[in-house]
Structure formats: C-alpha cells, structure tokens
Image: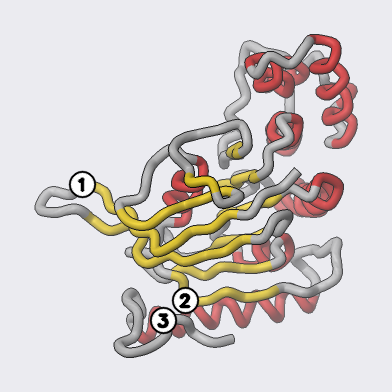
Amino acid sequence: MSASVTITDVAQAFPGRAKARLALDGIDLDIAPGQFVCVVGPSGCGKSTLLDLVAGHTRPARGSVTVDSARISGPGPDRVMVFQDHALFPWLSVEDNVGFGLKHSGVPEAERRATVATWLDKVGLTDAAALHPHQLSGGMRQRAALARAFAMRPKVLLMDEPFSALDAPSRDRLHVELQQLWADTDTTIIFVTHNVREAIALGDRVIVLSSGPGRIIGDVPVTLNRPRVVESERVVALAHRVRGLLDEADQLGITTPREGGDSYVSI
C-alpha cells in the first residue's frame, strides 16, 4: 500500500519572544506513490517539522499538505511515524509491542497474531518475540519498531533519524533490510537524516533544505542500483555532490529564494 504526498506552498511558524519564528517557508514537494524520499539539511532547518505536518501532528501556518489528494486534518492510520528513539513500551514483550497498533485498531486476535509473526520473521526477531525491550540490542529494538510500523500497513511511513543512535555495523545492516522491506511493501517513505551518505544509500530522491527557515534548495534523483551501502564508491561520490549543495548554499547565504528566480542550487 502506498499513497502520493503533495506539499503546496507550506510555511510553518512557532511562537517566539518578539514574533513568530519561521521553521519552513515556501515548501513545494510532490512525492509519488511508493517513492522513497530522503530529506537532509542543517540542524534547525525544519526537517522534523516537515514530518510532523505530513503526520498531522501540526497544521501549516500557510499552504496545504495532502495524501492521495485528501487534505490532512490530523493523525491517521494511513501514516505511521518511526522515531530516533524506538518508542517501544518497556512493559510489553516484543510480540505485544509489534501488535500494539493492530490491537487498538480492532484487528481480531488470530489475524493480529499471524500478522505479528510475519513481521517478526521479516525483521529476524522470531526468536525474540517473548523478550522485553531492555533485553534487546539497539539494532534489535529498531527492528521491532520497524516491524510494528510496517505491520500497520501504512500508506506513508515517516522516519525521523531512526538509525542515528546505532553503531555503524547495526546501521549498515538496517539500511539493507529497510530497502528490502520497502521493496516488498511499496510503501511511500519520507526519511529524515543528517547523514548524507545514508540519504543516498536509501532514497530515490534526496531533498536538500537550507538553514532555517527551511526551503528546498535541491531535489537530487538517485538512480543507483539497489541494494546500496554507504561505503559504495558511487554512493560516496553522489553524497559529495549533495554536500556541495549544502556548502554552496551556506557560502551564498541562501535562506530565501533568489530575487527574480529559482531558489534551487543546481547539481
């Protein structure tokens, strides 16, 4: 299951001492059903705010956000978020954590148990079903979080730096596994990261945001064969070009659209 996501002239602001502070401004983005889109940019550029808008946790100060042409008015089961912190319930077993959303969506027990078993198998946690989060490694906890998210069969999966706290070997394994889960489900994914190589390894496109207020300064297609790994020479080379976008924008002081023209930096 997948859905299109359309973001049209979106701005978002937060209260400040003197006046509202813009976090995002003038965001226009069309994401096709089943596309894997990564978003990179400096700290404070509004990456997480963008995810919150698509999730329906907040509403834009200006513009619109739609999923399959339906305007988002709040959270919904068609959109699921995976956070940097796995957000598992410590008092529940892995099996019960993965099935939590299904249970509270009214899925019958037999169907729920079958679905949970399927996803535990897909993420390699069948033998850990009865364990609790404190008994798992960091990588295993994030696998459980992924299983819980995919088990809900969302149309859009929103991922906010989910692998940033993991050691390099765990992160590299999860990069490959996430690509396979995405290929198996055709879910639309929007993935926020500070790691440019990670973005290239995972995404069909990499959206580059300027420093706050965040504006899109690059939309980079990634056509490398999958599965990809961050150490690949081609991934490293393209990541270098994306870093160049960020460096060029910083040197030019690009935080607003250029007068009389496009605000994108070319690649």
Q: Residue at x 47, y 76 (%)?
A: 217
Total labels: the figure holds 3
Residue indicated by mark 3: 263
Where residue 103 appears, as percent x and y from the top left, is 69, 14
Nearer-the-camera pick, 231 or 20: 20
Q: Secondary structure at mark 3?
A: loop
Q: Amino acid at mark 3?
A: Ser
Disc nearer the start of the sequence (1/3): 1
Q: Residue at x 45, y 35 (%)?
A: 74
Q: Extreme left residue here?
A: 18
Which image quarter is the C terminus in? bottom right
For the residues marked 1 and 2, what is the alpha-carbon distance in whole angstroms? 25 Å
Crowd class of label 1 (few under 14; some 14 to 19; many from 20; radius 10 Å): few
Image: 145 above or below 159: above
Nearer-the-camera pick, 139 or 33: 33
Res. 217 mark: 2
Disc nearer the start of the sequence (1/2): 1
Q: Amino acid at mark 2?
A: Ile
Residue 266 seen in this snapshot: yes
Crowd class of label 3 (few under 14; some 14 to 19; many from 20; radius 10 Å): some
For the residues marked 2 and 3, what is the alpha-carbon distance in whole angstroms? 6 Å
Residue indicated by mark 1: 15
Horizontal relation, residue 183 to residue 165: left or right:
right
Q: Secondary structure at mark 2?
A: strand
